[in-house]
Image (tube, rainbow, N blue to C red):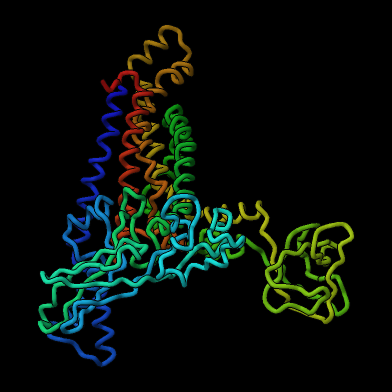
């Protein structure tokens, strides 16, 4: 059996490869891609600005179109672009066109260098950065004299730990020269920090008199194999960052849906099978099938209208409330010459950390914005404000009266838990309503089939108590269909209904995937498909393992 699962694990990678190839090709050939949308937006802006349109409705030149293709990664053939996305071929970054003026064979360009650390200039690897190791073009960016605190003419590891050692937005000059064969080369490679590459560009067909151009660029392996899923067109952030921001939300609802479904539905299915055709079985079946007949998004809309908007029992939207992380101290005021701050039912405790925002009252000592202070409680409606929490610390004394002072405190952990639970009630009901009936009836029906099997009658005839026969034999066999379905449930941890998330304004994976498809945000679409497909394949393997553990007849040999 071990060999079987090893083969399944090895098959996971080619299966993922086929899935991602198909999805990648579909996103490339589907009409209305990001390139077409960008062209339509530019065309609309041109028409609104009175610029009119050119022949065929295209509001950009061939060179501009090529730049748009490079921006969205559509300048490569489909399979080559897929290999780059996979990380088997390097990406071309920081592209820049350089023109050779009429008759000239030399040109230069200032190229932006990616952020780097001074320690990367240690070319000889001796652990020290010598002044001679700093390229002349970077001397103005590297603050060598400021970093060399001991004035020994080199930067050691301790000196390189300072913030000034991080160099950003630096540029270096690249010198180019054309040869007689029509090619181009970089003439100062030894003076450059980045391994720049260069090639000649083909002149555009709509401008045969255009000056010859060279393209400077650098290459870097940045794909799935390197953990880089690309950059979102819509959000302008790395895809991994966009997905990680929404992962806790979808995982929270997915995990709770999974736990509640199996912890409640399995015992309920067993109880219904053991009490078949009783008032308990018939009564619960009515509610179960009523819930199964109502789509989750319809139930969500009804609950939103009545329980949230009309009756205000639950919050109307969001994953948490606005004051989830910090809570304002309301109606705060202080009198002139007083050290006691007044706020009705402030709820503060001795030593609790608070901070002030906005316009600050005049006080002695001087108050500062977003600085931690500490409360010394006088009574339920007043407190003193201390600069430090220690015995004998002098409180702040107001020099003039002030009202509507903005003060905040950290929201207590128990309050955060209650707020999160209160916001989760309605969405969870929508997520549970469909799977609740399926798992319950699946458990009941298979248990009833096993209760009427011959081996159960034989066990009871031999004197085995009925409850023991159910627990040891019928129940275990009834769990086989659930074990088959259990591994597939792993995908719900990152899945989500975009309709439910839209109704309750939850920024999860479902809504992200839906908007990404509408906006043709291909990197995000590919990232979500990659994660979902991986979890689905892993779930299939987990299901096989669980079936083998539950059913002694199954042996994958």
> Is residue 219 rendered to the left or right of residue 164?
left
Q: Is residue 412 visible?
A: yes
Compared with residue 521, is residue 209 higher up or lower down, i.e. above or below?
Answer: below
| Image quarter hosting the C terminus | top left
Q: Quadrant of residue 522?
A: bottom left
Residue nearest the viewer, comparing 321 with 429: 321
Q: Is residue 302 visible?
A: no
Compared with residue 250, is residue 40 higher up or lower down, i.e. above or below?
Answer: below
Give residue 310's position: percent from left, percent from top. Answer: 53, 67
Give residue 104's position: percent from left, percent from top. Answer: 19, 81
> Is residue 275 rendered to the left or right of residue 450?
right
Image point (49%, 36%), residue name: 263
Image point (87%, 57%), residue name: 391
> Is residue 103 rendered to the left or right of residue 333?
left
Residue nearest the viewer, comparing 338 with 178: 178
Residue nearest the viewer, comparing 309 with 203: 203
Q: Quadrant of residue 152?
A: bottom right
| Image quarter hosting the N terminus | top left
């Amino acid at each position: 059996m071990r060999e079987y699962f090893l083969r399944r694990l090895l098959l996971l990678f080619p299966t993922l490869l086929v899935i991602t190839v198909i999805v990648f090709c579909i996103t490339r050939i589907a009409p209305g891609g990001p390139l077409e949308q960008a062209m339509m937006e530019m065309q609309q802006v041109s028409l609104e600005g009175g610029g009119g349109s050119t022949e065929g409705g295209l509001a950009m030149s061939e060179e501009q179109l090529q730049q748009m293709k490079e921006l969205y990664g559509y300048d490569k053939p489909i399979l080559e672009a897929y290999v780059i996305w996979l990380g088997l071929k390097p990406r071309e970054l920081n592209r820049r066109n350089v023109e050779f003026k009429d008759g000239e064979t030399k040109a230069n360009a200032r190229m932006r260098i990616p952020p780097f650390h001074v320690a990367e200039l240690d070319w000889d690897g001796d652990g020290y950065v010598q002044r001679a190791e700093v390229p002349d073009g970077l001397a103005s960016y590297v603050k060598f004299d400021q970093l060399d605190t001991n004035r020994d003419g080199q930067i050691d590891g301790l000196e390189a730990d300072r913030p000034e050692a991080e160099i950003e937005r630096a540029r270096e000059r690249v010198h180019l020269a054309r040869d007689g064969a029509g090619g181009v080369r970089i003439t100062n490679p030894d003076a450059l920090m980045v391994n720049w590459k260069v090639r000649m560009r083909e002149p555009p067909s709509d401008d045969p008199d255009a000056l010859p151009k060279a393209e400077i660029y650098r290459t870097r392996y940045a794909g799935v194999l390197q953990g880089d899923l690309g950059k979102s067109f819509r959000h302008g952030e790395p895809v991994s960052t966009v997905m990680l921001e929404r992962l806790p939300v979808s995982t929270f609802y997915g995990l709770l849906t999974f736990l509640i479904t199996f912890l409640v539905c399995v015992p309920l299915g067993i109880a219904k099978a053991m009490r078949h055709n009783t008032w308990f079985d018939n009564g619960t079946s009515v509610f179960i099938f009523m819930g199964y007949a109502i789509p989750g998004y319809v139930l969500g809309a009804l609950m939103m209208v009545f329980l949230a908007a009309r009756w205000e029992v639950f919050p109307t939207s969001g994953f948490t409330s606005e004051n989830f992380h910090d809570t304002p101290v309301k109606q705060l005021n202080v009198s002139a010459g007083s050290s006691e701050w007044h706020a009705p039912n402030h709820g503060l405790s001795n030593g609790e950390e608070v901070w002030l925002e906005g316009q600050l009252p005049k006080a002695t000592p001087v108050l500062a914005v977003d600085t931690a202070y500490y409360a010394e409680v006088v009574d339920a409606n007043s407190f003193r404000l201390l600069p430090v929490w220690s015995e004998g610390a002098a409180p702040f004394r107001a020099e003039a009266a002030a009202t509507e002072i903005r003060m905040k405190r950290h929201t207590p952990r128990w309050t955060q838990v209650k707020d999160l639970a209160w916001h989760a009630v309605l969405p969870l009901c929508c997520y549970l309503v469909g799977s609740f009936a399926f798992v319950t009836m699946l458990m009941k029906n298979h248990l009833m089939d096993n209760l009427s099997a011959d081996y159960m009658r034989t066990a009871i005839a031999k004197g085995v108590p009925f409850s023991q026969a159910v627990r040891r034999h019928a129940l275990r066999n009834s769990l086989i269909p659930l074990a088959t379905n259990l591994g597939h449930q792993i995908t719900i941890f990152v899945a989500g209904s975009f309709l439910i998330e839209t109704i309750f304004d939850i920024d999860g994976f479902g809504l992200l995937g839906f908007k990404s498809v509408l906006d043709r945000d291909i990197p995000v679409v590919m990232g979500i498909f990659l994660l979902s497909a991986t979890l689905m394949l892993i779930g299939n393997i987990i299901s096989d393992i669980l079936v083998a553990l539950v059913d002694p007849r199954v042996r994958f040999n």
